[in-house]
Image: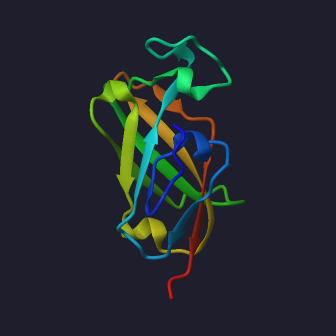
Amino acid sequence: MALLPTGSVYSDTDALREFGQTVKLVKGDQGGELQLTLKDSNTAAEGQTLDEDDSSTWAPLDLTGSTALLKLRAEGSSTVKTSVPMYHMGPPTEGKLFLQWPQAALDTAGNFTGELELTYSSGRVLTVYKELRFQIREDY
């Protein structure tokens, strides 16, 4: 995806996945939404030739039978602050997830990292290696 995140909806998975973008939020907000599209870098998208350096050629990750959690922790901490459930957007074969921020997730200002963990109905767990970065500032 080539779009940059705008407003309170962040949906540019490629830019976010390498700390290329920091999701900026405000303490106490609950109106924002985070949207992610997960892709399989080992499988070519339909009609594409796989290029490991070009995520537009990667197939969406099949999320059928999975649940997803975004684990959030303060930078430098080993303690998970909160785990926020993520939900499928459209057919699970499209690899799209979203979350709406619960109040407890954004109750502290600071810098945070997020790890996405998928658990399939078979019990298999897949953790996305690349972390997301979040900055939460104080409200006025």
Which residue does the image show at 51% across and 54% down from the upper left? 5
Left or right for 129, reference 31: right
Residue 69 drawn at (x, y percent): 43, 45
Q: How many dots with numbers?
A: 0
Left or right for 74, reference 27: right
Please determine whether, in this image, residue 136 is positioned above or below residue 139.
above
Please determine whether, in this image, residue 105 is positioned above or below residue 80.
below
Please determine whether, in this image, residue 135 is positioned above or below residue 43.
below
Which residue does the image show at 45% across and 25% down from the upper left? 61
Toward the left, the furthest residue is: 90
Which residue does the image show at 48% across and 33% down from the upper left? 38
Toward the right, the furthest residue is: 76
Of residues 134 and 65, the one drawn nearer to the viewer in this rendering:
134
Q: How is the image coloured?
A: rainbow
Which residue does the image show at 38% across and 41% down from the upper left? 97
Q: Name the quadrant containing residue 105.
A: bottom left
Residue 45 drawn at (x, y percent): 47, 17
Residue 72 drawn at (x, y percent): 54, 56
Please determine whether, in this image, residue 99 is positioned above or below residue 42.
below
Q: Name the quadrant containing residue 17.
A: top right
Residue 30 drawn at (x, y percent): 36, 69
